[in-house]
């Protein structure tokens, strides 16, 4: 169980870091993948802000796991699950599909909460 808990946490942290990088370097494509495409004349700075915050969240998760341990990472995962839950609502409120809202964002929140539970169980 130790390997599964740590492996899932690392995978999720790296995934968020990569999502952040995509928003920094391919903001239009990343927004479309998020479920709410942006207008062509929209301000890309806001997408880059999201990218920076996601990348930092991934790095923070990795740092907590490496230097503070499973308990700190478990609390981080519990709290950070609010982000994909919020993303679910944002996609629904802004014309995204229910499939994207629930199939990507809500499902991500469930996996993050499962990761927190595994880490708390160690």
Image: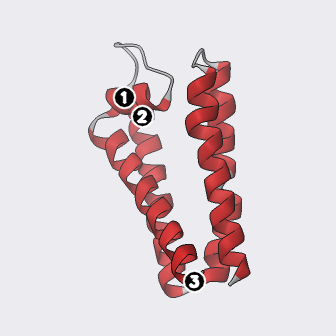
On the image, the x and y values in percent for residue 87 come to 62, 36
Q: Residue at x 41, y 13 (%)?
A: 39
Cα distance, mark 2 to mark 3?
Answer: 36 Å
On the image, the x and y values in percent for residue 122 come to 68, 84
Q: Residue 47 shows which numbered tag? A: 2
Residue for badge 1: 44
Question: Are the residues flagged by discs 2 and 3 in contact, CB closer than 8 Å?
Answer: no
Q: Earlier in the sequence, mark 1 or mark 3?
A: 3
What is the crowding at mark 1: few (fewer than 14 residues within 10 Å), some, or many (at least 20)?
Answer: some
Q: In this view, does 89 lie above or below 97?
A: below
118, 95: nearer the viewer: 118
- Report helix, strand or loop for mark 1: helix
Q: In this view, does 75 lie above or below 45?
A: below
Q: Outermost residue toward the front?
A: 1
Q: Outermost residue toward the left?
A: 25
Residue for badge 3: 2
85, 48: nearer the viewer: 85
On the image, the x and y values in percent for residue 116 come to 67, 67
Mark 2 vs mark 3, foreground winner is 3
């Amino acid at each position: 169980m130790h390997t599964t808990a740590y492996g899932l946490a690392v995978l999720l942290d790296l995934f968020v870091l990569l999502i952040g990088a995509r928003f920094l370097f391919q903001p239009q494509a990343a927004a479309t993948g998020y479920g709410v495409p942006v207008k062509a004349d929209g301000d890309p700075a806001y997408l880059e802000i999201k990218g920076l915050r996601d990348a930092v969240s991934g790095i923070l998760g990795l740092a907590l796991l490496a230097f503070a341990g499973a308990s700190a990472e478990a609390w981080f995962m519990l709290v950070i699950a609010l982000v994909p839950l919020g993303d679910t609502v944002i996609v629904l409120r802004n014309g995204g599909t229910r499939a994207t809202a629930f199939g990507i964002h809500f499902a991500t929140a469930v996996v993050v909460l499962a990761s927190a539970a595994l880490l708390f169980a160690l």
